[in-house]
Amino acid sequence: MPYFSWKAFSLWLAALACLPLGSIANAEPLQWVTVGDPGNTADTAPAGYGAVATSFQIMKYELTNQQYTDFLNSVARTDTYSLYTTSMGSNAHGGITRSGSSGSYSYSTKTNMGAKPVNYVCWFDAARVCNWLMNGATSSSGTETGSYTLVVGPDRG
């Protein structure tokens, strides 16, 4: 499965109306925007876009490298679900490094990259972040149930 920017994922995140209005440890508070006017008419150019069936909330800003690092440090000491991708550390567009070995991994942001949007996150990683947020965003918060019950293993498909 190809990786994509969190920016591209933000449209998908719109479906998550039930996330708590909280913050991730040591990070800026998450800010949410309500998209309302349920039942509105779709746009005509381009046709078919813009209608919403129900009101929902979407993150106002993309998830940052620091926020994703906090998530990784909370749930990925072993990294069972391959939430970290080596491109996050080796590619110039990546903003997160990993050290240690499985069972004791720790993550940190690259210099001057903490406030930038996270990259190299696939749909399953994003769903796990959403579940973790919904379940309280702590080290004991689950990633496999919540808004999305994930039944696919670490091979992502």
Image: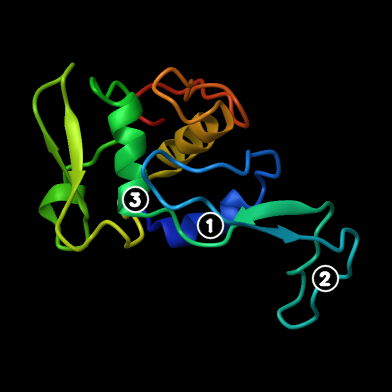
Residue nearest the viewer, comparing 140 with 82: 140
Q: Is residue 2 visible?
A: no
Residue 95, position in %: x, y? Answer: 22, 54
Q: In the current view of this chain or complex, which residue is farthest to the bottom? A: 45
Name the element at disc 1: helix
Which residue, given by chain and number where applicable, does mark 3 sit on?
3
What amino acid type is highlighted by mark number 3? Tyr
Which residue, given by chain and number where applicable, does mark 1 sit on?
10
Q: Is residue 108 visible?
A: yes
**In percent of the image, x 46 and y 32: which residue is there?**
128
Between marks 3 and 2, how big is the CA–CA gap?
30 Å
**In percent of the image, x 17 and y 26: which residue is there?**
105
Relative to 134, is 38 above or below?
A: below
What amino acid type is highlighted by mark number 2? Ala
Colour scheme: rainbow
- Residue contact between numbered discs 3 and 2, judged by CB atoms under 8 Å: no
Residue nearest the viewer, comparing 67 with 26: 26
